Image (spheres, rainbow, N blue to C red):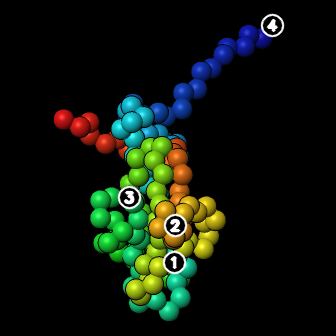
Amino acid sequence: MRRVVPVLLLAACSLTPIPDVTSNFAEPCETSLRVCEVPFSLKAGMEQTVELRGDFRDGGWAAGVPMERVSDAWSTTLQVPWGASVQYKFFADMKWLLDPVNMASVPDGKGNTNSVVRDVSCVKWACMPAAR
């Protein structure tokens, strides 16, 4: 009778952890401290300058965030608190523009309409430092 001896083959392995770059890991923190990156973009036309203006910070309607033109779009990204809503418009060459790809809008109470992003949340967030 022939005897079968099991053989254990070990694959080469490392004790150094390999980060999982495909996961959506986000650092742990209270929901009230979470911020999400929210991208804003506007298809480029003949504009020379574009700013994102809105209620995302004090004075954000008067002095906006400059947007960068990359290829055929103007874009920028904001850090927005988890659960917040942001009213905004594009200010292109001294003209106000609603976001043409975001149909969500709200009246501002002064006879104008603003684009809005409501109840911001994200899979991968950052944590704001706790207020002292």
Q: Which residue is mark 2?
A: 114
Q: Secondary structure at mark 2?
A: strand
Q: Earlier in the sequence, mark 4 or mark 3?
A: 4
Q: Say which residue appears at 31% left-offset and 42% top-offset.
A: 128
Across and down, in percent, residue 108 comes to 49, 63
Report, in whole angstroms, how far the alpha carbon at label 1 lies from the one at label 4: 86 Å
Q: Can I make out residue 119 in this image?
A: yes
The 10 Å Cα crowd at callout 3, few under 14, some 14 to 19, many 20 or more, is: some
The 10 Å Cα crowd at callout 1, few under 14, some 14 to 19, many 20 or more, is: some
Q: Is the residue 56 above or below the residue 120 in the image?
A: below
Amino acid residing under circle 1: Leu
Q: Which mark is residue 97?
A: 1
The 10 Å Cα crowd at callout 2, few under 14, some 14 to 19, many 20 or more, is: some
Nearest to viewer (mark 1 / mark 4): 1
Q: Which residue is mark 3?
A: 56
Nearest to viewer (mark 4 / mark 2): 2
Nearest to viewer (mark 3 / mark 2): 2
Amino acid residing under circle 4: Met
Q: Is the residue 13 above or below the residue 55 in the image?
A: above
Q: Say which residue appears at 47% left-offset and 79% top-offset.
A: 96
User: Dividing the image into 4 quarters, which one contains the N terminus?
Assistant: top right
State the image quarter where residue 127 is shown: top left
- Check contact, mark 1 vs mark 4: CB within 8 A: no
Q: Most extreme residue toward the front, as rendered?
A: 110
**Which of the pair 49/113 is nearer the observer?**
113
Amino acid residing under circle 3: Phe
Q: Which residue is mark 4?
A: 1
Q: Secondary structure at mark 3?
A: loop
State the image quarter where residue 16 is shown: top left
Q: Say which residue appears at 41% left-offset and 87% top-offset.
A: 93
